[in-house]
Amino acid sequence: MADMLSFDDYTALAKQIDLPDACHIEGSYHTCSGPALPVHNPASGELLCTISMADDKDVDFAVSKAREVFDNGDWSKAHPATRKQVLIKLAKLMQRNHHELAVIESLDSGKPISDCAQIDIPESINTLLWHAEAIDKIYDDVAPSGEDALAVIVREAVGVVGCVLPWNFPLLMLAWKLGPALAAGNSVLVKPAEQTPLSALYLARLAVEAGLPRGVFQVLVGDGPTTGQALGCHEDVDMVSFTGSTQTGKLFLSYAAQSNLKKVTLECGGKNPAIVLDDAEDLESVAQHIVTGAFWNLGQNCSAISRLIVHEAIKDKLVERLNAHIKDWRQGEPLNPSNRLGVPVDAAHGAKIQSYLDQAKAQKLDVLAGSLEGPICPVILEVPQTGSLLAAEEIFGPVLVVHTVKSLDEAIQLANDTPYGLSAAVFSANLKKAVRAARAIKAGTVTVNSYGEGDITTPFGGYKQSGFGGRDNGLAAHDQFTETKTIWLDLADNAPDQI
């Protein structure tokens, strides 16, 4: 567990940090020519800085520098051990600056400092270290081609890669993409969410200090229609890796079709179920997992538990325990380490969450825990299985809907009744039932008697409209940032010298 500072120390540090206020292109901060983007602290409304967005010309310039450094081989053709050492140094610099990174992340996103300091920053550092250590341990292949030929299958970097990030885990999602993309030798252009650009810009400065060649890692601040579309449609960008909403993810598929048919990987939304059967043991533990899964980061999490599917025999007992655990999630000033919940990332997203709460009021849904009144806070609602948007749409907020079922088969059918398929959880003392359910649920990650996403070693991504084209984490992440090439050598004695 990372060391924590006091509320006063974090407040003082927040006043001392020199926040980046420009895009980072070709190794230095660069004032772009697009419209001004104000960056606010969502908790206080304070203006943190103003950044000029990257427009089409800025994107063209950054892409040209990324292509130039990729082609000259300073990074793409560097020895694997060299790339490894640079990424390790970057991770060490992140560790040296971990308090500053945690404060920047909290100020920018409204996330509680406890999450930033104890989860997001340490896991981001671990992600870079893990992929750095994998660089010189991933072997290419030799096919079983017989004595008359030698077939070698090699991995090559894709080239110029655009990474488009979400605002809910700004630095961690950057690390998920940056680690394997740089490990493979790519040049990387990052477009952070316009709400949360600061940690990516800060990391870009550390990357130069770590020895990453200029132009290999650049940060382009901007919105989707301006900077995101320019990256997605650019003829000289070879790949886009996107994390965000399903609706926006689909746009990048269309951008690829309109331009150079670039490679696209998408990690998108979810409406994730947790099934609790009547034989589940230790309902205290079950309730703790569900509350964490539903309300961590104020429910602003693509893998958040948003649907509780519970057997009728234990529903009341479980709800009682859920109600008790919610009270432990104190909400308030994000820089105060005693608070476990922050605020919505911006006013627009807060209004979106509130619109669903207003629907719940209009539909007169039963409130099982929490409240629909006052500031946005965790709430648990009993919702019909059909006919309510709260049961069907991704709210991306602290709202857990409850469905009651009578059997495992009914629970599985309801769990799969969604266009999404990112994650799920099953709680049962019967391992056979739990494994049967885990196999039947159409989701990329299914946890048993727990909530989680696996770890850095396990692939993360979704089925259906939750994902496309690849997986984050594990060695699968390296696969998506590389191309596979077959090199065939004909060794037959009677082979012609020329073709």
Image (tube, rainbow, N blue to C red):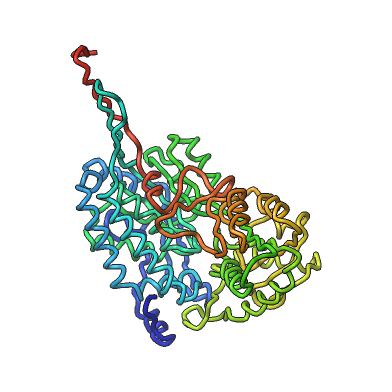
Residue at image location 55% in from the left, 44% down from the top: 250
Residue 355, image x and y in percent? 70, 64
Foreground pick, 56 / 28: 28
Residue 260 appears in the picture as rendered:
yes
Please state if 143 lies on the left or on the right of 247 as rendered. left
Q: Is residue 252 above or below residue 382?
A: above
Instruction: Say whether residue 188 is left or right of residue 148.
Output: right
For residue 49, above or below residue 233:
below
**Does 37 appear above or below 482?**
below
Q: Residue furthest bottom?
A: 8
Position of residue 265 measured from the top left corner of the image (x, y, whole percent): 46, 45
Could you say which is closer to the camera, residue 35 or residue 147?
147
Q: Is residue 86 left or right of residue 299?
A: left
- Could you tell me which residue is drawn at 64 percent across and 48 percent down? 419
Residue at position x 37%, y 81% from top? 13
With 211 as the anchor, is 356 left or right in this view? right
The N terminus lies in quadrant: bottom left
The number of numbered badges drawn on the structure is 0
x, y percent for residue 376: 64, 73
Quarter of the image containing the C terminus?
top left
Task: Residue at 49% x, 69% y: name it.
Answer: 109
Q: Is residue 77 above or below residue 206?
A: above
The picture quadrant where one finds residue 285 is bottom right
**Residue 288 sits in quarter:** bottom right
Place of residue 87 in the rendered image (x, y in percent of width and height, measured from the top left): 27, 58
Residue 247 appears in view: no
